[in-house]
Amino acid sequence: MATRQTAGTRAKDSDRNNTCQVLDSALSDGQLSMEEHRTRVAAATTAATLGDLQRLVDDLQNDDAPVQMPDLKKPLPMAGRGSGWGMRAAVAGVLVVLGIAIGWGLYGNTPSPLSFTSDPGAKSDGIPAKVITPPKQLQSLGGLTGLLEQMRQRFGDTMGYGLTIYPDYAVLYRADPTDDRRKLNYTYRGGFDDPYPSTKSSEDVLVDLSAFDVKTTVGLLRGAPEMVGLQQKDVKPGDTYLTIDPSRDVLTPGALTLRVSVSTDFGSGAITFAGDGTLKRVDPADV
């Protein structure tokens, strides 16, 4: 190439081919995306002047390219046939680079916006992990209190037809808002699963299932084996469960009846009490 070439010098096919080689090199080392490379190559093959070609590689590091672009003495505005297309191509290239840079800043996880070797979703987004620790040991003060709170969060209240509480799961019976002849049965295991329906009976009365003394109830849960004549050492996990149901006493509408049932290899028994802990009945173990 002539040593005194300028931006206005008309380009030859060899100049266009050299420019395409520089663009190919930029693509291979991650400076250009496939779309940018395609756009710039298309512009290079129709470029009219050396200035048009130079603008396609001005932002590239091309020291390692197989060919070097000429050192133009003085950049001049594009002129002559084809200059309008060159300008449009250059503007399009700048917009593409700007779009990639913005996207990289928002979502990228790579050393540069022109590197596409990493998953953009891997970039840290600054959102801390949200860990929810639901109660699992339900027959305890914290577990039973936590279960009732989980009901409030899930349903907005603690109303229901009944609640059965095992050491590590529970079954809740609630009204079916779409059919007053049915009730919905929810199983709780760290969260309430999707319900399954069952037929509502005449004994199903809607009450507030949290209307009892939790601390007193936990104490009676733990003392139930001895109260029915069983030894605590014989009670295994899962041998004891608590039921909470509407009271059948017509004089105390809305009241609850709680029952702790204990079953071991040496017999089974139960105690029944009111929401405030008042004993109603003791069924000794059938030993």
Image (cartoon, rainbow, N blue to C red):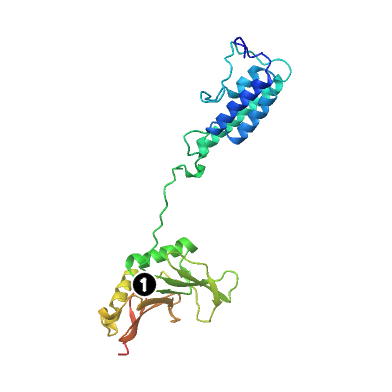
Q: Which residue is more in the foreground, 269 or 177?
A: 269
Residue 196 visible to the viewer? yes
Question: Residue placed at 58% from the left, 77% from the top?
Answer: 181
Q: Return the x and y of residue 170 as percentages of the image width and height.
A: 42, 71
Query: Residue 83 at x, y = what percent?
Result: 70, 19
- Image quadrant of residue 136? bottom left
Residue 254's spot in the image, x, y percent? 45, 74
Quadrant of the rendered image containing residue 196: bottom right
Crowd around label 1: few <14 · some 14–19 · many ≥20 (10 Å): some
In the picture as drawn, the residue positioned furthest to the bottom comes out as 287
Is label 1 in a helix, a strand or a loop?
A: loop
Q: Would you say 66 lies left or right of 46 here?
A: left
Relative to 123, residue 181 above or below:
below
Work out whether 142 lies above or below 126. Answer: below
The residue carrying mark 1 is 167
Left or right: 277, with 172 as reference point: left
Q: Amino acid at mark 1?
A: Pro
Q: Which residue does the image show at 58% across and 33% down from the upper left?
A: 99
Q: Nearer the viewer, residue 6 or 224?
A: 6
In which quadrant of the rendered view does residue 208 lie?
bottom left
User: Residue visible at 65% across and 29% down?
Assistant: 41
Give the percent coordinates (x, y) of residue 191: 45, 64
